[in-house]
Amino acid sequence: MVITGMVLLRIAGRKSISQMSVATTVIMISIGTTIVQPIANSQLGKAIGSAAIFILSLIFIEFLILKFNWFEKLMSGQSKVVIENGQIVKKNLRSFRMSVDQLEMRLRQKGIANISDVKTATVEPNGQVGYELMRHAKPVTIGELERILGMKPGIPMEQSSLFREVSKNHHPSPIDPTLQ
């Protein structure tokens, strides 16, 4: 049963617990319960069959998540802006049931000393914090340094931002996951 469980989980795909969606977590717990049952009842065929059905359900759900943006939001949740222009957005922070102290701890772990240095910060559906620093707090990249020193002219300083998608609540242009 252990080998069967490992094979089925391998088919389901590798994800750490922090990357699992609600659907993935429920199905993984269900598979664990299903695998334990045959040991007590001596019905290996039924356990393998039901575990396989759970895995197929998971693969189908993940396909729907890739295909339909509304289904992804329903199943996985969506990122929310928790810092905007150096100011904490407490309403969004509360929706994640996260205190200001917890947010500050996560920012410190990322090497950020001042909230006022953060242009935008988001809490992702998996609980991770993403951030973009204010222009004055950003480290200089080699590309920017080359441009400043005149070694690489013509590259614009402002680039597209992943955080615009979260703050505006939509992709700038439709994304077709089948093309990626």
Image (tube, grey):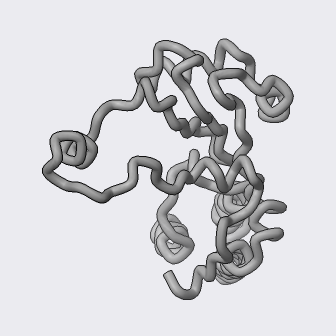
Q: Is residue 111 visible?
A: yes
The number of numbered badges drawn on the structure is: 0
Q: Quadrant of the N terminus?
A: bottom right
Q: Closer to the camera, 120 or 4?
A: 120
Q: Is residue 44 visible?
A: no
Q: Closer to the camera, 17 or 133?
A: 133
Is 124 rendered above or below residue 56?
above
Residue drawn 73% across and 57% down?
A: 76
Position of 73 with respect to 4 (left or right) is right
Residue 24 in the image, given as x and y percentages of width and height: 68, 61
Residue 54 in the image, given as x and y percentages of width and height: 71, 74
Tell me which corner region of the image, top left, top right, bottom left or bottom right, holds residue 60. bottom right
Is 106 rendered above or below residue 51?
above
Position of 44 with respect to 130 (left or right) is right
Is 80 rendered above or below residue 176?
above
Q: Closer to the camera, 132 or 158?
A: 158
Residue drawn 54% across and 52% down?
A: 161
